[in-house]
Image: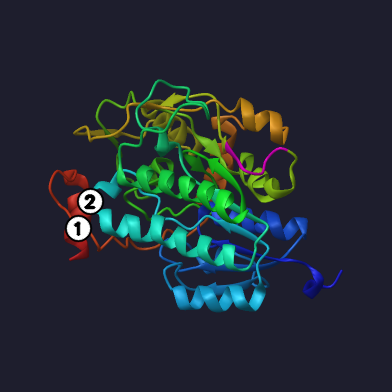
Amino acid sequence: MSRSSKPYALVTGAAGFLGVHVTRQLIAEGRFSLVALDDLSGGFREHLPETVEFVHASINDVALLQDLFRKYKFKYIYHLAAYAAEGLSHFIRRFNYANNLIGSVNLINEAVKVSAECFVFTSSIAVYGSQQPPMTEQTFPKPEDPYGIAKFAVEMDLRAAHEMFGLDYVIFRPHNVYGEYQNLSDPYRNVIGIFVKQIRHNQPMTIFGDGEQQRAFTYVDDVAPAIARSPFVDGARNEIFNIGADKPHTVKEVAAAVAEAMGKPNHPIQHLPARNEVRHAYSDHSKARGVFLLEDETTLANGLARMAAWASRVNIRPLEPFSQIEVEKSMPPSWLKYLAHAQ
């Protein structure tokens, strides 16, 4: 089959961490002619194969999106673009909603116009807020931060677009995904990446509060393939799926496991004042396992070993602090220092 005879698919956030893995999976499967879009605010073009058709742009550039959809008539949209900083979203509310909600709506509009067949969206466990874990898809969302609110709003908008226009969707709620190609320079999100960088720079691993917060940490290869093939899996369309690891760990346990994987088992830990965050958050994945026939998850030790092997040989880019903070009140002091650096 020639490339031009394949249906076109758009991947947004394609140069970001999860986007890179989904894009590579789609390339390997060969179903589509792919267009990869990213504004490179947190991703890196060099993580994608040079052969992929790449567009350096924002999902808030409506005119550019209109041109792309008119040109390619995308049948499938994989929407992974987001500024996924749950805790920071309290302090960047306007930026959060502009990028994570309005940008998503821009894509939904264009998907409707070209009668796209399926819109795959990565939401987040953040939609649940602080409810009794493990949360199932039947647990009604009660997001507690602007990031989770934006994700839930997009979920509802996709449901409305399906009912009004017939746009099929698949929604995933992943959580705490880690692995190769993660941005190791981001000081605000992805705690495993932060720990890796701190060990590489011989700095103590910083933990907010007592470190007894519980999360289930998900190796990226356990979720990216399911996301990539989801439009073609029986029973997946117009459904919502929790996806990720089942076994929760405390942040202190994860810090020790990262240090072990990096060959620094006695690396020091520094406890910072507790911040406002959900104490315990992990999900039930029975629904996804049944529909996608998922295999056993990668253990934390094995996933971290793979990530450490990659992280030990890559260059960590210079710190680029987020420069669009809107509210400084109640911001953790350890984040304020990055703000001062940016100024």
Q: Which amino acid type corresponds to the residue marked 1 in the rendered image?
A: Glu
Q: In the picture, residue 149 is in which quadrant?
A: top left
Residue 262 in the image: x percent, y percent? 48, 40
The quadrant of the picture occupied by the C terminus is: bottom left
Give the prevailing secondary structure in the magenta stretch: loop
Q: Residue furthest left?
A: 329
Asked whether the beta carbons under mark 1 and mark 2 sit within 8 Å of each other, the answer is yes
Q: Which residues are magenta?
A: 235-240
- Residue toward you, 298 or 35: 35
* Residue at 40 percent of width and 65 percent of height: 41
- Residue toward you, 121 or 188: 121
Instruction: Determine if the magenta segment contains residue 303.
Output: no
Q: Determine whether 325 is above or below 54 in the image.
A: above
Give the colouring mode of the picture.
rainbow
In the picture, the disc for residue 91 is 2
Q: Residue furthest right?
A: 1
Q: Earlier in the sequence, mark 1 or mark 2?
A: 2
Question: Crowdedness of circle 2 by 10 Å Cα count: few (<14), some, many (20+)?
Answer: some
Q: Secondary structure at mark 1?
A: loop
Q: In this image, 68 relative to 291: left or right? A: left
Q: What residue is pinned by disc 1?
A: 326
Residue 213 in the image: x percent, y percent? 34, 26
Q: Secondary structure at mark 2?
A: helix
* Residue at 58 percent of width and 75 percent of height: 68
Q: Residue furthest front?
A: 164
Q: In this image, 72 relative to 202: left or right? A: right
